[in-house]
Image (spheres, rainbow, N blue to C red):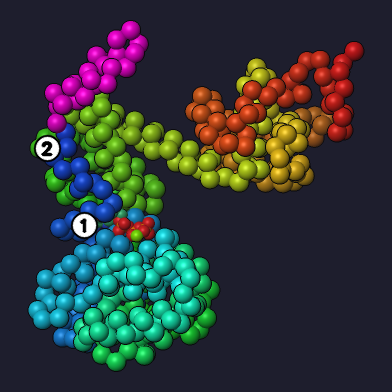
């Protein structure tokens, strides 16, 4: 990487921006790789588009389509396909434009907030506060609004990530009752989920409100992901910026992760950004590999930050033993001991049983943050030998972002302090 942005080791922001502006241009339209971008075509979603178009076509003649569900693993294009079809329908709706209310249930998830969100979206401002009114009042207001504003047209209610609803039975009951009580407007409910067993937890009545039929989105294979990337890349990058093999590597890496198109696009975008940062004229497979490493790291950072405090303390124990116990073989018993010391120092946490510590060790292993190999230790029986799989300085920077444990980052565990020994819960100075 050309690095004229630093002189005597100090970062010079003016130089950096000047170099950036004079540097090679890679992105023609960066937004085309954003998750919110709706592409003009969706390769390999013909069957799904056909089914949804078939179900929703009657709205063009003023009839209400029956409710339906879309299922499919993450990144199979469910949200993109619904948005795509809604735009197409809008092109062909001559007289009465249908309304589309899009609800992301990971954000708007309670029965009250769903009704309020529908109301506020139709009026175009936040008329109903996020809490405070009786739900039935909103329900009545919404009925009036739908008949007045949507009139004889259809109102599509898309419940995206429906499995994340806080009380799906109540929401579905409310929305069904809404439809039954309307005079002129009719609604069509479209649920989207990546949990295949989502319906199993519903009441029979709520279940039937979503209709019998579901549209299943197939997982993409590497070739299909390659086609998707090619069509997005032609909008996003300048011609001939991508070197041979870049798209197929992104596609292959994402195919390994359950054929997730979001992941494939993320990789391509990040590879482009890395090339841009390094002032390279072209994006190469080595940029893709770097992008993959960065994304893995980001995933680990998010994972560790989102872990419960006790799990973070277990990880902290591994970190501290690795830091202060040079070349020490770390066994699960060590982690149990150090965790107990740490737990005594962090308000609101308690020591855990060996069994719980072992569960946390398993979770950290599954997440790929540590490796734990079973090893026979002769007289002491079998134990687990633990290694960190994550860079120490990265781990330190993540742990330092957890307020409650930051003060312990330089704590030297008793089992490493040469002049101290711990017996049961007591610490003694060695003579
Ligand atoms: N066939 C396709 N052609 C072009 N882009 C696609 C295609 N399928 C998915 N994408 C893109 O991949 C990304 C992920 O797709 P989308 O958000 O629709 O997935 P999803 O099935 O809704 O996933 P989740 O269950 O995680 O919400 C989006 O940027 C979308 O534009
Ligand atoms: Mg989605």
Residue of label 2: 238
Left or right of 308: which side holds 229? left
- Count of labels shown? 2
User: 30 or 16: which is nearer to us?
Assistant: 16
From what the image shows, is residue 245 above or below residue 411?
Answer: below
**Placement of the C terminus among the 4 image quadrants:** top right
Q: Say the numbered circle drawn on residue 404.
A: none
Q: Secondary structure at mark 1?
A: loop
User: 101 or 236: which is nearer to us?
Assistant: 101
Residue 290 location (% of width, % of height)? 34, 30
Left or right of 21: which side holds 111? right
**Sooner in the amino-acid sequence: mark 2 or mark 1:** 1
Can residue 18 be found in the magenta stretch?
yes
How packed mark 2 is, by other alpha carbons closer than 10 Å (few <14, some 14-19, many 20 or more), is some
Residue found at the far right of this picture: 431
User: 393 or 42: which is nearer to us?
Assistant: 393
Q: Secondary structure at mark 2?
A: loop
From what the image shows, is residue 155 above or below residue 82?
Answer: below
Residues rendered magenta in the picture: 3-25
From what the image shows, is residue 237 above or below residue 326?
Answer: below
Which numbered mark, 2 or 1, is in the foreground of this view? 1
Q: Residue at x 87, y 29 (%)?
A: 426
């Amino acid at each position: 990487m050309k690095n004229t942005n630093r002189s005597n080791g100090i970062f010079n922001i003016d130089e950096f921006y000047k170099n950036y502006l004079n540097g090679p241009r890679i992105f023609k339209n960066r937004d085309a790789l954003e998750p919110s971008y709706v592409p003009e075509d969706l390769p390999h979603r013909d069957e799904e588009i056909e089914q949804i178009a078939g179900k929703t076509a009657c709205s063009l003649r003023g009839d209400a389509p029956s409710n339906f569900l879309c299922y499919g693993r993450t990144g199979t294009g469910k949200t993109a396909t619904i948005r795509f079809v809604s735009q197409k329908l809008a092109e062909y709706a001559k007289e009465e434009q249908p309304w589309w209310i899009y609800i992301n249930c990971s954000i708007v998830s309670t029965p009250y907030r769903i009704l309020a969100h529908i109301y506020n979206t139709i009026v175009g401002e936040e008329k109903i506060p996020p809490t405070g009114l009786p739900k039935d009042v909103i329900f009545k207001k919404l009925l009036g609004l739908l008949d007045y504003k949507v009139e004889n047209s259809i109102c599509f209610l898309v419940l995206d990530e429906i499995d994340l609803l806080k009380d799906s039975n109540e929401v579905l009951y409310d929305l069904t009752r809404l439809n039954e009580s309307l005079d002129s407007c009719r609604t069509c409910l479209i649920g989207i989920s990546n949990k295949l067993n989502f319906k199993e937890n519903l009441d029979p009545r709520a279940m039937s409100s979503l209709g019998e039929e579901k549209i299943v989105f197939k997982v993409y294979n590497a070739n299909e992901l390659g086609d998707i990337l090619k069509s997005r890349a032609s909008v996003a990058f300048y011609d001939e910026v991508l070197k041979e093999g870049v798209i197929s590597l992104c596609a292959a890496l994402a195919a390994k992760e359950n054929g997730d198109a979001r992941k494939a696009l993320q990789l391509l975008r990040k590879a482009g950004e890395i090339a841009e940062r390094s002032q390279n004229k072209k994006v190469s497979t080595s940029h893709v590999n770097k992008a993959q490493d960065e994304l893995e790291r980001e995933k680990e950072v998010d994972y560790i930050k989102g872990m419960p405090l006790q799990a973070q303390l277990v990880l902290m124990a591994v970190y501290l033993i690795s830091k202060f116990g040079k070349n020490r073989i770390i066994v699960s018993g060590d982690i149990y001991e150090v965790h107990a010391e740490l737990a005594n120092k962090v308000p609101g946490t308690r020591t855990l049983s060996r069994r719980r510590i072992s569960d946390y060790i398993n979770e950290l292993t599954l997440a790929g943050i540590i490796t734990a190999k079973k090893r026979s230790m002769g007289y002491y029986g079998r134990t687990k030998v633990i290694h960190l799989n994550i860079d120490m300085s990265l781990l330190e920077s993540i742990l330092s972002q957890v307020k409650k444990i930051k003060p312990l980052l330089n704590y030297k565990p008793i089992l490493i302090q040469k002049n101290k020994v711990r017996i049961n819960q007591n610490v003694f100075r060695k003579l």
